[in-house]
Amino acid sequence: MRYTRRYGRAPGGQRVDAAVPLRNGPNVTLVAALSAQGVEAVMELDGALNTASFAVYLEQVLGPGLQPGTWWSWITGRCTRPTAWPSW
């Protein structure tokens, strides 16, 4: 992961001198549920989140841990709006 800033500030007339590490390794996506008890149902993906991987997260990671009557929602992104969802 890369957390180094692209721009910096220095006193007048001086240059910013900072090393920027090379980007190594693949992109990693972390999907998790947040509840009153803390972070739950965590899944790590290599690469980007898409509709198929989000459906796997709902079916295999988040879904089994939900109790009947549990309220839940998610922030909508393009990959979380498929035409049909599996029913539990």
Image (tube, rainbow, N blue to C red):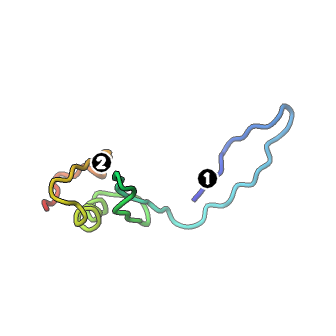
Quarter of the image where the C terminus is located: bottom left
- Which amino acid type corresponds to the residue marked 2 in the rendered image? Trp
Residue where numbered disc 2 is placed: 74
Percent x, y of residue 13: 86, 33
Of all residues shown, which one is farthest toward the right? 13
Q: Distance between the residues labelled 2 and 1?
A: 26 Å
**CB-based contact (under 8 Å), mark 2 and mark 1:** no
Q: Which residue is drawn at 27% across and 62% down?
A: 62
Q: Position of residue 14 (x, y in %)?
A: 85, 37
Q: Which mark is residue 3?
A: 1
Mark sitting on residue 38 = none
Type of the residue with mark 1 = Tyr
Residue most extreme to the top: 12
- Closest to the observer, 51 or 9: 9
Residue at image position (61%, 61%) is 23
What residue is at 79 percent from the left and 43 percent from the top?
A: 16
Name the image quarter holding the N terminus. Answer: bottom right
- Give the structural element (helix, strand or loop) at label 2: loop
Q: Where is residue 12 in the image (x, y as percent from the top left)?
A: 84, 31
2 or 1: tag closer to the N-terminus: 1
